[in-house]
Image: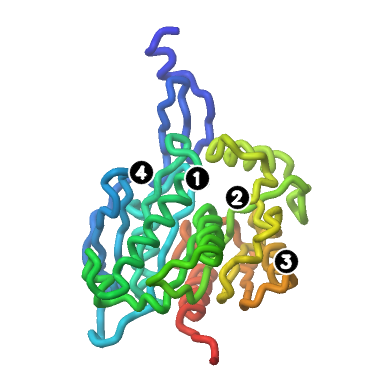
Amino acid sequence: MDPAAMEKELVHDFSPFFRIYKEGRVERLMGTEFIPTSVDPKTGVESKDVVVSPKIGLSVRLYAPKLHNRNQKLPLLVYFHGGAFCFMSPFCAIYHNYLNTLVHEANVVAVSVEYRRAPEHPLPAAYDDSWTALKWIASHVNGDGPEDWLNFLADLDNVYLGGESAGGNISHHMGLRYGKQKLEGLKLAGIILVHPYFGGNEPIGAEANDLEKIEFTEMLWRLACPETTGRDDPLFNPLADPNWASLENTRVLVCVAEKDFYRDRGWCYFEKLKESGWEGVVEIMESKGEDHTFHLMNPTSEKALDLLKQIASFINTRPKA
């Protein structure tokens, strides 16, 4: 076939998110812009980019709020963006603006991870990159790591993992890996799963009413993880993992949206974790009348602000000893 024709021949069309062409080119349609770091004029939050591993192209964007007490270290939020493992970036306007707002509201230091994306880098690349980022953060435990913001501003005994959609999936798996391996230098205080991107072979709840979305979700998942065993792969369906309750015994906040296709998966995760004998504490919040990642699309809406405040409260409410 003529190379010019191959260039134009679509293999997968996941518009409005991304397209894949026969010759292998990936055309991302959302979250492709690069927003420079700055001091945000609305919140006073400052940001900067740091390369973690030049070898694999792993970098992070750091955020620090306007400090009122320079002698007090702040909780650290490690944030994993969504996008079905295939699109979006910490550097795009949606995530940059959201992290500025979240860091200001919660008064935390944040590390937003730019993991490698599928299909060019299929899973487990995103998981491995995220774990590498956590190990890099842990290298600052003695205050002599490569990044001063983490050495002097972040409380590594008070670390939260969070993200929405695919980022929620990553947050779960980082909590699971931490529970199995630990990570000297970091003490995990909580995990925040917002509209987590989970699935399973058997439809649950309202999923059974949307077979087209089930098919679409499976196509996306197989594209991100070509070697998967399917929708009951423990990477996609945490409940299919017999050891899933080895998740670190910490606090977990699950956030779901009433109209979201993945709502019932979030509720099932919450209920099964609570019943599993797991020794942590799990909470759930549902945003009525809203859909998947609505808070990113309409961040100033009343429900988005409610979700923001709930996340901030979760981070800043330490359990009683």
Q: How many labels does the image show?
A: 4
Cα–Cα span, label 4 and label 1: 22 Å
Q: How crowded is mark 4: few (under 14 residues within 10 Å), some or many (20 or more)?
A: some
Q: Is the residue under label 1 in contact with that under label 2 (CB below 8 Å)?
A: yes
Amino acid at dot 4:
Thr
Q: Is disc 1 placed on a helix, strand or loop? A: loop
Q: Confirm whether residue 65 shows in the render.
A: no
Looking at the rendered image, the disc whose residue lies closer to the viewer, 4 or 1, is 1
Q: Mark 2 or mark 3: which comes first in sequence?
A: 2
Q: Mark 2 or mark 4: which comes first in sequence?
A: 4
Q: Picture coordinates of residue 47 (x, y %)?
A: 26, 64
- Residue hosting label 2: 235
The quarter in which the C terminus is drawn is bottom right
Q: Quadrant of residue 108?
A: bottom left
- Residue hosting label 1: 124
Amino acid at dot 1:
Pro
Seen in the image, is 1 located left or right of residue 223?
left
Q: Is the residue under label 4 in contact with that under label 2 (CB below 8 Å)?
A: no
Q: Is disc 2 placed on a helix, strand or loop? A: loop
Q: Mark 4 or mark 1: which comes first in sequence?
A: 4
Q: Is disc 4 placed on a helix, strand or loop? A: loop
Q: Nearer the viewer, residue 210 or 79?
A: 79
- Residue hosting label 4: 32
Cα–Cα span, label 1 and label 3: 25 Å
Amino acid at dot 2:
Leu
Q: Is disc 3 placed on a helix, strand or loop? A: helix
Amino acid at dot 3:
Lys
